[in-house]
Image (cartoon, rainbow, N blue to C red):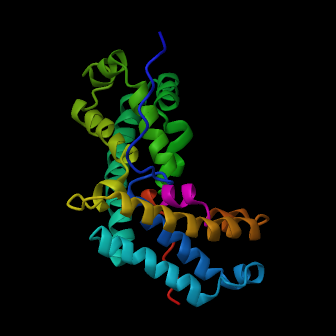
Amino acid sequence: MDAPKKKAATGPVRAYKGADADMLTTLLVLLDAALAEQPALVQRRSRYTVPFLKALRKETADALEIDLGIDPRSARQEATGQVLTAAAEARHLLADFYQDLRDAYANNKPRLQELRAALGFRDHYATVRDEHQQALGQLLAQFDQAMTPALLAELTDPARGDISASLIADIRAQLAFYELNVTQENLKGTAVIITRELVEKFNALYRKVMQVARLGRSVFRLAPAKAARFSYSHSRRMLRGGQLNAPPTA
C-alpha cells in the first residue's frame, strides 16, 4: 500500500525569519545603513539614489504603521529599551551574586576559582560589566546550566556558601530575557489579521531590501564592520540586543 501523501501547505510562506514586525523593523535598520552609505552604493547601482532609498524606507515604515498598527518612529526604541532594562537588572543581580560568592569562598581560593569557571564568571564577567549583551547571554546560560541541585545546595547552605536561594532563582529567571525575541513580543500587532496578501506584500518588501543589503555587503566586503550593518541576521540580533546605532538624520 502506498504511503499517504503529505498535504501541501495551504498558508503563505514567509521569506524571512522572525515575526512580521520584527522583520519590518530590521528592514528599517538596514535602510538606515544604506542611506548612511548611499554615495558608495550608488556607484555600483545607479538607481540607489537618496529618493529611491527614502521611498523604500517610507514603504517599509508604512507597512509597520498601516498594516500592523505600529508607530515606526518608536519601534526601535521600544524594542531596544525593553532589552536594555532587562539587561541592567541581570547585571545588578550578577554583581550581587559575584560579591557574595567571593565573600563566601574568600578562605578557599581553589574552590572559588572552580566556581568562577563553572558558573561563567571567569570567561564572561569582564565583558558583561562592559555591557556586552552577547556575553551577558552566555554568562546567564552557563550559570543556569551549571546550577545543579548539588551545587545549589552547597551555595545556599549556611555553613558553606550561605548565598540567598532567591537571588540565585532571580538570576536564573533572567535567562528568559536573552532567549525572548523582544521585538516580536512587544511589536507584533496582535489585533491585526495577517492575510495571504499581507504576507506576500511583506515578502516583496523583504526581497527589495535584501537586494540593497547584498550590495552593501559586497561593496564593503573589505570592511567587516560596515558589511555587518547590511546583514539581516546581524541587524536583527543587534536590534534585540539593544546595540544599534541611531539612524541617520538626513
* Residue at 29%, 38% in the rendered image: 173
Q: Is residue 71 above or below residue 80?
A: below
| Magenta region, main secondary structure | helix
Residue extending farthest to the right is: 222
Q: Is residue 117 above or below residue 250?
A: above
In the visual, does 173 lie left or right of 199?
left
The verdict on residue 216 being magenta is no
Give x and y (percent) for residue 227. 68, 65
Q: Which residues are magenta?
A: 229-238
Q: Is residue 97 above or below residue 66?
A: above
Residue 67 vs residue 153, the one in the foreground: 67
- Residue 244 seen by the camera: no
* Residue at 51%, 49% in the rendered image: 134
* Residue at 23%, 57% in the rendered image: 190
* Residue at 52%, 85% in the rendered image: 54
- Residue 47 seen by the camera: yes
Give x and y (percent) for residue 13. 45, 49
Residue 197 vs residue 20, the one in the foreground: 197
Residue extending farthest to the front is: 1
Residue 110 vs residue 155, the one in the foreground: 155
In the visual, does 191 lie left or right of 88?
left
Could you tell me how many numbered marks the image carries? Answer: 0
Residue 6 vs residue 64, the one in the foreground: 6
In the visual, does 70 lie left or right of 240?
left
Q: Is residue 111 above or below residue 177?
A: above
Give x and y (percent) for residue 99. 37, 41
